[in-house]
């Protein structure tokens, strides 16, 4: 459980979570976009396991789960879902997954592939 929620740590945890997603997309977007287009999928599911592998920890949040649990306790699931532009549900290999509409996924991929 999270004790006191400090603004700077909330911002840091949310930034780390978002950065893990963007790093994951940078690695997987091209292949995933091709699959989505070929299959006509309406949504994309990203297991948090992929985010664990792309996470770059800090002293305050050495693991993705640390940042996620802190943010979850301080701002709640809706804010994290909005930040990641999708819906977080239980499931997948890691226990959680992010579900994105194809349009959101394509937009995030355009953003990450530009940089």
Image (cartoon, helix red, strand yellow):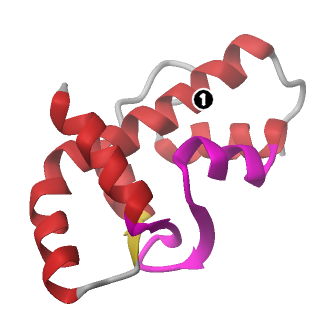
Q: Residue furthest bottom?
A: 39
Q: Is residue 98 above or below residue 26?
A: below
The magenta region covers 76-102
Residue 91 lies left or right of residue 79; in this view the side is: left
Q: Residue 86 in the image: state x and y as whole percent.
A: 56, 59
Residue 74 magenta-highlighted: no
Residue 79 magenta-highlighted: yes
Q: Is residue 24 above or below residue 86?
A: above
Q: Secondary structure at mark 1?
A: helix
Residue under the point 26% across and 47% down: 109
Residue under the point 88% across and 31% down: 3
Residue 10, image quadrant: top right
Q: Residue 108 in the image: state x and y as whole percent.
A: 35, 45
Q: Residue 90 in the image: state x and y as whole percent.
A: 61, 77
| Residue occupied by mark 1 | 13
Residue 88 lies left or right of residue 29; in this view the side is: right
Q: On the rendered image, what quadrant is the C terminus found in?
A: top left
Q: Residue 101 in the image: state x and y as whole percent.
A: 46, 68
Residue 62 can be seen in this image:
no
Q: Is residue 62 above or below residue 85?
A: above
Residue under the point 85% across and 24% down: 5
Residue 40, image quadrant: bottom left
Residue 101 can be seen in this image:
yes
Residue 91 lies left or right of residue 30; in this view the side is: right
Instruction: Give the crowd class for mark 1: few <14, some 14-19, many >=20 residues within 10 Å.
Output: many
């Amino acid at each position: 459980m999270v004790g006191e929620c400090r603004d700077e740590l909330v911002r840091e945890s949310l930034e780390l979570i978002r950065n893990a997603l963007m790093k994951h997309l940078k690695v997987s977007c091209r292949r995933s976009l091709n699959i989505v287009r070929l299959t006509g999928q309406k949504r994309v599911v990203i297991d948090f396991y992929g985010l664990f592998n792309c996470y770059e920890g800090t002293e305050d949040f050495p693991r993705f789960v640390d940042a996620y649990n802190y943010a979850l306790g301080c701002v709640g699931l809706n804010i994290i879902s909005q930040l990641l532009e999708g819906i977080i549900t239980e499931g997948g290999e890691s226990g959680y997954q992010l579900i994105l509409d194809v349009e959101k996924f394509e937009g995030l991929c355009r953003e990450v592939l530009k940089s």
